[in-house]
Amino acid sequence: MQLSEHRYNTVSSIAGPLLFVQGVMQARIGEVVRIQSPEGKVLDGEVLEINGDTVMLEVYGITQGLDIKGTSVVFTDSVKRAPLSRDMIGRVFNGAFKPIDGLPPLFPETWAPVTGYPINPSARARPVEFIETGVSVIDGLNTLVKGQKLPVFSCSGLPSKEVVAAILRNARIMGREASSQERDRIRQAGDFVVVFAALGLTFYEYAFYETVLREMRSGFVAFVNMADEPVMERLLTPRFALTAAEYLAFERGMDVLVIITDMTNYCDALREVSTAREELPGRRGYPGYMYSDLASLYERAGRIRQQKGSVTMLPVVTMPEDDITHPIPDLTGYITEGQIVLSRSLHQKGIFPPVDVLPSLSRLMQRGIGKGHTREDHRAVSNLLYKYYAKGRDLRRLEAIVGRDGMTDKDKQMLDFADSFEGEFVHQGGARRSVFETLDIGLDILKRFKLEE
Amino acid sequence: MTGRITGISGPTVSADAAGLKLYERVFVGHAMLTGEVVRIEKNRSVIQVYENTRGLAVSEPVEGTGTPLTVRLGPGILSGIFDGLQRPLQTLRDESGPFIKTAKALNPLDFSRQWAFHRLIKEGDTLHPGDIIGYVREGPFQHTILCPPHVQGKLSWVADKDIRLDSPVGALEDGTEIPGYHDWPVRVRRPFRKKRSPSERLVTGQRVIDFLFPIARGGTAIMPGGFGTGKTILDQSIAKFADVDIVVYVGCGERGNEIAELIEEFELLKDPWTNRTLMERTILCVNTSNMPVAAREASIYTAVSMAEYYRDMGLHVLMLADSISRWAEALREISSSLEELPGEEGYPTYLASRLSGFLERAGVVESGGGKAGSLSMILSVSPPGGDFTEPVTQSCLRTSGAFLMLDTALAHRRHFPAINWFQSFSLYGSELLEQEREMVPLEWEEARSRCKDILQKEEGLREVAEIVGVEGLQDPDRLLMHVAETIRLRFLSQNAYTEDAFSAPERTLSIIRGILDFYDEASKRLKEGIPLEELLTGKGLRGEGIER
Ligand SMILES: Nc1ncnc2c1ncn2[C@@H]1O[C@H](COP(=O)(O)OP(=O)(O)O)[C@@H](O)[C@H]1O
Ligand SMILES: [Mg+2]
């Protein structure tokens, strides 16, 4: 791996997570460096920029305690790689891919660069295979398919982790024919695996997820960067997770569901590095390249023609100030294939999952539903539910102005429909629903109201 | 012409190479990454690298090629899928697997393929750059083989049967061989004899566009809209149904899965005008969001050069780019890594002039070979936060002929295409009117103004209804509201997943005529005292109602 290592003691300046070293002979962009502090602590880092013989490094770890005189830097002549093996399944690693579950280190079968490579667009297979999440608003109206990237847009204080947990517990990656025995068989055969990346989570949040992961029958691999762990590592953690996911999917033929939470912490880390680099800040201080950077993560979801395996991604984004036009949800929505938007007002009404279907969208739904995928009437049911609910929501505004009495009977019915839709279809508590149950509930509400125009 | 790398920052590399020219193509590092010289200083040249610079080291070699960044033009481009540097992606996939790992240069054209060649000149003729030597048949088209730039002289021989691109199609008396293809610098527009004003309509198959905001062949249109407003679906629908010979589709910094979907569909679906598969008339140029940023910047130039090449054969070409904002962002990333002084929102101050220079490559032209062809452009724009006051939308607005504003509120109501009928406009209306008058005397014009009028009135009435409730409106007003709703739901909306995805002009006109006839008839009955409810359910009407 390491062809020729060079050690330098020529640190010229340190600024936050950045370190400048002078007199370096042959640095490479992306080259891994090891930084030794005066007390002998060793940190990882990477070459970000080279100007003549001055090299700018990004340090993955806490730079506190480093100084100019006593710090040395080793250039390893290799780029950041992830050690990969099937034995990752069932293991918990930190953000730098070191085991934190007390079990012995991994024996890698192979290594791969953490940044991955773009899938050749002409080699992609178009995502069409239905994934049943057991959640009505998703399966019925915003269907998820294998190879899709579908984020959950949440607000602080909303139960995004409970929504993710519900999906984790109930997702059936196999289509409709799969009986529950079959599902168990698939899970036991290890063809379905969850890769979980925690970015900047509090211990409380992480403990919740860990319990969920342990209770699942399918395998999982977890990468954990907690709130008090180095911010820079947060930029690396999802890349390790996705490299592991790609390996399991495309080398081992598994269907991989990647959960990344919370992307907002990732973007804040990105902003921190950018500011330290004194780059020109873009909207709200986030760097101008944030779109491309986010795409380099999200676009790793997909399927490949004539090959088994898939990477499906469910990132969680907490919208700062509940604002969907904030750069983090905005750029995410521009890259992902839809979004599941949680709503504060539904949550206050006690509805779980509190998904607002109007701004929610699954762009790949059309190909994954209907005959041969879910049920023949799926498209019609979903279109009608959506249409009437949108109308009912519109009318609520009118009701607030003119009062219920000023409205036509038809409009009153539409209002009641919207309430039933929220209370019966969207709200399901902790129960799991098959897609058929979901469609039947939808049909039932539609029949009850007879809303033909 | 060779030197060494002295610095690397993102996609920008400095080198001590002397003697390089501005915009010269260079090979960077042992991996031979493609780059372009973007700045020359006394002791260093700054190079924009079109590939990922990870792993690149200082003191690796930099080598000039003596030529600018070019695109290879010749038979076999049609149906191709290329990246932003015109690398054939399918060949790349077949040779090196599903992931793009190498920066390998690949020939965009298949040199081993045989083409039946028909020559149009003979030995002894004098040849100038741009002259037609002959043609081959590429799909349904006569693909003219042109005399390459810089080649001039008396012909000593010319092929008269099958040709392959790896051998010449002819030679000059001085021994110069003439290849059947040529390389063209992407940033230079291809010359033409004369530019004409756009005067023919481009049928897109989308009623709201063809009827309310028509686009001309050779014209330009922009479609700005926040995420989820339907830009991509609209782009792809137009790519499927537009009444043109050739479509060049640029996937510029967007999703890989969308491209996979497009490829699969286009290999199956038929062009409604010719009944051939869509792929036979399509050229794809894709640089998805996770592919190198600088190549994304180049991709629109690569694509437009290919589009111009086919235009020069006298064909009608439509170029669609999804999205031009990603191109502008690439430009911004490059500019910022060059440490240029930023303009508005960090975009370089030359954003507007670059954009208008690019949009000017559209038009109706008479080529050097004497053929008249057109190049139309439809560009989607992705404004941050859906805010149209941002620089890219505003810069496009100044030079484009039609502005199709996609509205988030309409999209949330699933009214697609979510083109806002109050804010959008087309400057082509008046030029195209002449043509419309010939097609259907006055009818389009009249129907259009009535339709706009009804929608305008609905807006006013809606405000009143917010206060008094719909019940509080007069019957004629309620009838108008009903008609307006019908126009929105049955006419302006088109579901891309149904048969209705494409609407031929006759169908477009017949639907609106049906709705307006209903309105006239119902208004008359209302005056005669028939109750509104009966009219709305169709009971109180004679004759047929609205066509579905
Ligand atoms: N003409 C249409 N008919 C039906 N659905 C549409 C249409 N246009 C857009 N949509 C819906 O809107 C979603 C987003 O459209 P898309 O073109 O991907 O938006 P954008 O490119 O603006 O982000 C699609 O996945 C589809 O569900
Ligand atoms: Mg799009």
Image: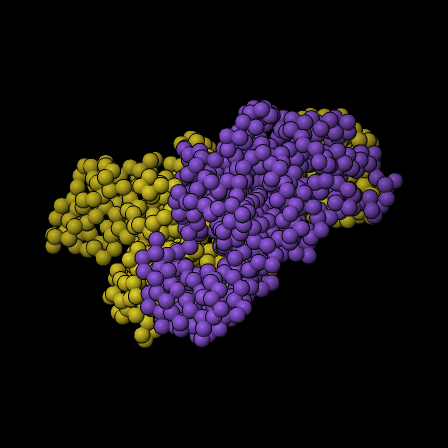
Chain colours: A purple, B yellow
In the picture, residue B360 is in which quadrant?
bottom left
Say whether residue A163 is left or right of residue B189: right
Say whether residue B103 is left or right of residue A188: left
Q: Quadrant of the N terminus of chain B?
A: bottom left
Q: Quadrant of the C terminus of chain B?
A: top right
Q: Is residue A104 in view from this perspective?
A: yes
* Residue at x 20% of width, y 37% of height: B162
* Residue at x 73% of width, y 26% of height: A444
Q: Is residue B222 in view from this perspective?
A: no
Q: How many marks?
A: 0
Say whether residue B298 is left or right of residue B203: left
Q: Position of residue B301 (x, y in %)?
A: 39, 54
Q: Position of residue A176 (x, y in %)?
A: 58, 26
Question: Front-most of A229 and A310?
Answer: A229
Position above or below: A313 against B333: above
Position above or below: A1 against B234: below
In the picture, residue A247 is in which quadrant?
top left
Position above or below: B193 against A208: below
* Residue at x 60% of width, y 51% of height: A262
Q: Position of residue B113 (x, y in %)?
A: 25, 38
* Residue at x 62% of width, y 37% of height: A215
Q: Position of residue B271 (x, y in %)?
A: 44, 34
Q: Residue furthest right?
A: A405
Question: Front-most of A125 and B305?
Answer: A125
In the picture, residue B394 is in which quadrant?
bottom right
